[in-house]
Amino acid sequence: QVQLVESGGGLVQAGGSLRLSCVVSGRTFSSHAMGWFRQAPGKEREFVAAITASGFTEEYADSVKGRFTISRDNARNTVSLQMNSLKPEDTAVYHCAAGATAYSIGASENRYNYWGQGTQVTVSS
């Protein structure tokens, strides 16, 4: 059974930083791309960032470019999202997602076949 467990969310002031982590079990982590999505209250889930299985290629939503960095540690089955210069509009539940293939990155949710339960990030103004 594949499980994705996120951690690292919390409450932070605008301009602050948080680091989210997602640990994956039940599949060969190093063979699959990984992504982060977020869902704010009353809004649809949206793409944040993704990284290929090798870690060589990253992709970001325009709204987080230059502020967020995705990374992975294949030895620890972990994908992380470093979030800097946080804004109130970054407030959301953040979900990690496992790609169907090594190169399944991008904004389309169809490219991901497993999802975590999410971790809450709240940015106060």
Image (spheres, grey):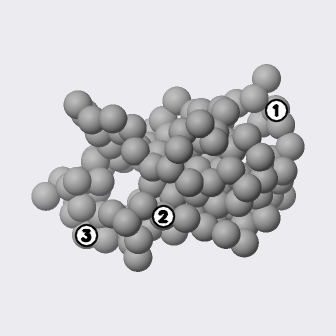
Which numbered disc flags the more N-terminal residue, 3 or 2? 3
Name the one closer to the observer, 112 or 21: 112
* Element on which disc 3 rests: loop
Kindly identify which numbered label has been placed on residue 60.
Answer: 2
Residue 15: numbered disc:
3
Res 120 visible: no
Residue found at x 39% / y 38%: 45
Disc with the residue nearer the chain's start (1 vs 2) = 1
Residue type at mark 1: give it: Gly
Do the numbered discs 1 and 3 sit on residues whose CB atoms are within 8 Å?
no
Name of the residue lying farthest toward the top? 1
The quadrant of the rendering that contains the C terminus is bottom left
Whole-angstrom CA distance, mark 1 to mark 3, is 36 Å
| Relative to 34, residue 65 above or below | below
Label 1: which secondary element: loop
Q: Amino acid at mark 3?
A: Gly
Q: Name the residue located 23 percent from the left edge and 31 percent from the top edge.
A: 42
